[in-house]
Amino acid sequence: MAAARLVDELTSKALGRYSIAVIGAEPRRAYNRVLLSSLLAGEVEEKDIELKPAAWWRKRGVTTIYGRKVARIDRDESCVALDDGSTVDYDRLVLATGSDPIRLPLPGADLPGVLTFRDLADIERIRGAMKIGARAVVIGGGLLGLEAAYGLAKAGVQTSVVHLMDRLMERQLDAEAGAMLGDAMNARGIGVYLNAQTKAITGAGKVEAVELGDGTIIPADLVIMSVGIRPQADLARAAGLTVNRGIVVDDAMTTSDPRIHALGECAEHRGIAYGLVEPAYEQARVLAGSLAGVSALYEGSITATNLKVYGIAVFSAGDFSGGETTQSIVLRDPGMKTYRKLVLSHDGGVTRLVGCVLYGDTQDGLWYFDLIKRGAPVDAFRDVLAFGRMLTDQKAA
Amino acid sequence: MNALVEAPAVRTTCPYCGVGCGVSATPDGNGGAAIAGDTEHPANFGRLCSKGSALGETLALESRLLHPMMLTAKGAYARVSWDDALDAVAQGFSRIASEHGPDATAFYLSGQLLTEDYYVANKLMKGFLGTANVDTNSRLCMASSVAGHRRAFGSDTVPGNYEDLDQADLIVLTGSNAAWCHPVLFQRMLKNRAERGAKIVVIDPRRTASAEEADLFLPVAPGMDSVIFAALLVAIVERGATDPTYISQYTSGFDEALASARLLAPDVETAARKSGLEPAALREFIDLWIATDKTVTSWSQGVNQSAQGTDKVEAIVNCHLATGRIGRPGMGPFSLTGQPNAMGGREVGGLANMLAAHMGFEPAEVDRVRRFWNAQRMATREGLKAVAMFDAIAARDIRALWVMATNPAVSLPRADHVRDAMRGLDLFVVSEVMRSNDTMNCGAQILLPAAAWGEKDGTVTNSERRISRQRAFLQAPGEVRPDWWIVGEVAKRLGFGAAFSFNSPAEIFAEHAQLSAFENDGGRDFDIGGLDRGNTAYRDMAPVQWPARENGAPAKRLFAKGGFFTPDKRARFHTLEEPALKETACAEFPLLLNTGRVRDQWHTMTRTGLSPRLGAHLPEPFATLHPDDAELAGLVDGGFVQVTSRHGRAVLRARVSDGQRKGEVFAPIHWSAETSSDGRIGALVQPATDRYSGQPELKATAVAIAPVSFARHGFALMRGEADLGEDVWFARVAVPGGQGRLLATDVSLEDCVTRARQLFAGCELAEFRDDAGGLYRVAAFANGRLAGAFFVSPSSEACGWDAVKALFAADEITASERKLVLSGRDASGLADSGPTICACFGVSLAAIRDCLASGKAASAEEIGVALKAGTNCGSCVPELRKIASAHQKALALA
């Protein structure tokens, strides 16, 4: 996805300046991973999730090499070697290798039926394991785990989510929104186990159950591990580039080799390897600019989560947890299944929005996000801030 | 019920003030009625004021007392049968009268009762229980006028009529804010001015709405009215403006009266100094008065509610007698009665110092009434007047009390003392239309459900001696009964059945009329023998003025050619005392508290308080302060002020106005312990009374003021009753669909959260919380409706009251409305439309300002055209003028 966006940005800024080749290990054009759960749920078809059609790539003169893996980078020769032995030369190399799902080294983790949820191949595997009356356990109640659980449940699989933390999606939601989400999932028949350490996956020859630390046994025909991602930095590491958790890049998205760049989930910028699409797109814009000869700097993303889980819109941005130095405004209407928390800083007599969580009604999410990014003073409309842009604009007018 | 058959309109009379407007009530078949002015009634010719117009909003049964109740040993009320309740009343009165004498029993009645009710109660006490301890809330209202009339005319007679207000060339209003308190009459005065060029002079310590409309306003120092009229009398004589023939033929005592007036007001300068006026203004008034033959001098509570109220009445009457300006069209002294039937009460003798039918306690009068009633045990001397009556209750000299249709725990001076006194009664009976009020809450043992306006039948007499019928147009709900029936049933149980065998108000009225004519050779003013014409005539009786003698036409005016009701048929001039307030400002209590009414409320709000429309003008108990006094005390407009007297304290919203005299505080009388936490003004008022009338000086109590601040302000909206806690200041406001509380408190935000959640337990709650901003708001939902709301903020400015109130009134709440409800704003972003200025058409301050800003209107008249505001009762016109002129000023500055 990062690569597709980069090509889009670059060709619109400087079409023809570079001869571009896109190499992907998966045997298909780039697709929208965010829609994998919808695909699993049967809400969309595979063709619907393709990001750009063949013609689009062709029109931009992009050479697309799919289904072949890059074996190594040869920095001395300025080329990459593919697994079929061929090479592709470069003046500039961009790594957009993404990330791999983490597999927990649990007893029974290698049993048939223990899968991950990352790419189309995973979807095919999951589909292969689904049968009438199948029961699935998703280990991990983060964003990806819940998306997997959503897809499974929608596809008719009796699904449970096992989560180590005290609330779901703790990286995107505060406690109250997480609890509301848990309630919503329960209401949809999905079992949610919180504070639940998975002790083992058990079964004779195939998955039969998940055993929790407290002794709870959850019968399962299918286990999806969705406990996080790890930047895919193998090529970079092998090529001797600086790699921490991800491939280290500077503000120009350049690695330790000035001719090699990285972006997206494989990259680590200022110590952060983002796992979201929005920073990848921002990085693509910056990198495309610098490749096009326009000096541009990426200074990190204030991340926002803006998505639908189980048909429930959730949005979070900035520092939504707050702390002793921040203030918060809460608006909740459990009957309408909506919740908002706005986190404010108050320094030198000026109040600014620094984070927010929206649950159920995210209409004003991007507006809040803009206020957060701009650091705009909100004192003049603090009283109506929680009610969104409409009342604030009216107040200003 | 056949919905196609329209119930006929019933012609009745408004139950509020003494104007006595005719009302046409058309029942809707569901317990309500459409209310309109009776176009043929000579008091109002179709007009109604805001209160009268809103009568339809006060007919609901939710807060009514519908069954007899008795207090049980456990302290709760239990429903009992009428027989049990009446037996208990009769046995209680009988026992206490036999153990402690008849004077240990008392009735405290009301100007809200109909003449027939009053007659029966008065007859029972004064003729059969043998005590004159029958007094009435008219003591707080009209007693000084009664005393003044009787001393001057030999009878309690209002000489003129309302047509005089149409025909006068000068109308003087002294101690009367008629614009708010007698709005329909005030509109007649304004019409006279507009059409005939009459002048209006207002004499009042406050620049009231009436004063705003006046051609000349005299901001008199409190209690000093008689100095002005003494100066006037002196000037009348000095300029040779007397009517020597009238004085010599029809009066006596002129020289002494003039001498005393000269002592009070030797010259205009001295009089001006004493009365706190500019000499030029006083001179202008005197010139105008002397030069205008057709002059009506009207007064109301500002004159009456005074320890020298009787003197003030005499001072006014003296001037009219001296000029012979009495009893002729367009002139005369004219007392504007407060209550709908204060006059009727006076006619039957419902005051402790009157016996019956305008007769007193002269032995011949007592004997005459005894013979007429065939009475077994006549009271032979005056009973205790209201203030003294409640002191006697406190002293346990009176042990049995029956209160009918009034709320002394709120309205009497030193109301906390009154409350404590009633708690010590051996027998405490209350006849009421409402299920609960402050008086009942003082331990009333027997509650008797009385028929309310619209359910009962009888007569009332208005300020111009006009008797009008009040007619029933609604079924009596539950077990309610008319007061005359209740009293009559007790009388029967006491063994007086023969004298109380009334079957209808018509029979009572007939007896009342017969008594008025009994041995009346024209020596008594009150004679309505000509109205004793049988049941049908009573049913159809058109409004009629008394006297209405058997052989004579009803009198429109009296005394043009003497004919006073003194033994020598001459009126009496009276000498005047040097006026002095009973309490004056001192170091500890440096200000004077004046009390009065607001435009849209009546008495203790038990009825007007049910109308959302009427609650929207001035929803909170307040104190008006002069800017200098406010500044000295560190008070700001819109803040809170604690007002303390020697007798009690109140915490009120402060309103700072230069219409208030420096050194004085004004506070309205309406709020009770049921409608406010700290707004009972009666608790502060000192109990000194006029020596002739016994009327308390309700308008001058020494007080101290201090600012009060609350950490949180806000409101609650609820479908039913709820206790918010002792530590919450509140004012209750009727709102469509339930009740509101405007509140202020120091309790923590966390406590607010806890209480609000308890308040709305069982509902779906939506909450808004900004701890650092000090904001907490909750909305409760049930059955798709907004079931309640609770908002607090640190700001004393309104925060969403109007917007949320509108949603609270609606039958359902949409998702988009629900999303915004806690913002306190409607979808257009409007938070508050401000107070309702025009109660008749429900026009808010915001709407008026919009109209002015849009250029659609620039004056009060144009606002009327654009929004209808002020075009019904007109009592908001002075306010409209103020708003319009403030807008013009702002434009000029911009």
Image: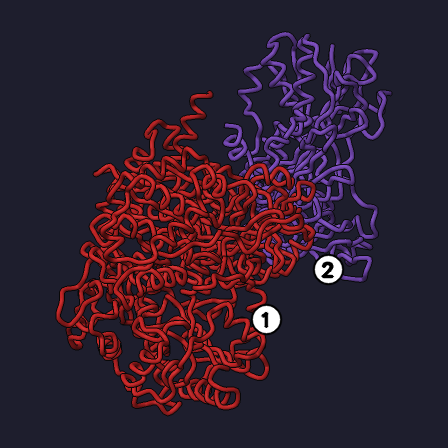
Chain colours: A purple, B red
* Residue visible at 78% across and 58% down in the picture: A211
Check disc 2 and report the residue beneath it. Answer: A218
Distance in Å between CA atoms under marks 1 and 2? 71 Å
Q: Position of residue B855 (x, y in %)?
A: 35, 27
Q: Chain of mark 2?
A: A
Depicted B575 relative to depicted B815: above or below: below
Is residue B831 visible to the viewer in this orientation of the structure? Answer: no
Q: Position of residue B777 (x, y in %)?
A: 59, 48
Q: Secondary structure at mark 2?
A: strand
Camera-side residue: B843 or B183? B183
* Residue at the limit of the structure toward the bottom, as seen here: B495
* Residue visible at 69% across and 29% down in the picture: A350
Check disc 1 and report the residue beneath it. Answer: B420
Left or right of A59, for residue A69: right
| Amino acid carrying mark 1 in the image | Asp
* Residue visible at 22% across and 65% down in the picture: B546
Left or right of B50, for residue B770: right
Q: Chain of mark 1?
A: B
Depicted B84 relative to depicted B13: above or below: below
Q: Quadrant of residue B687?
A: bottom right
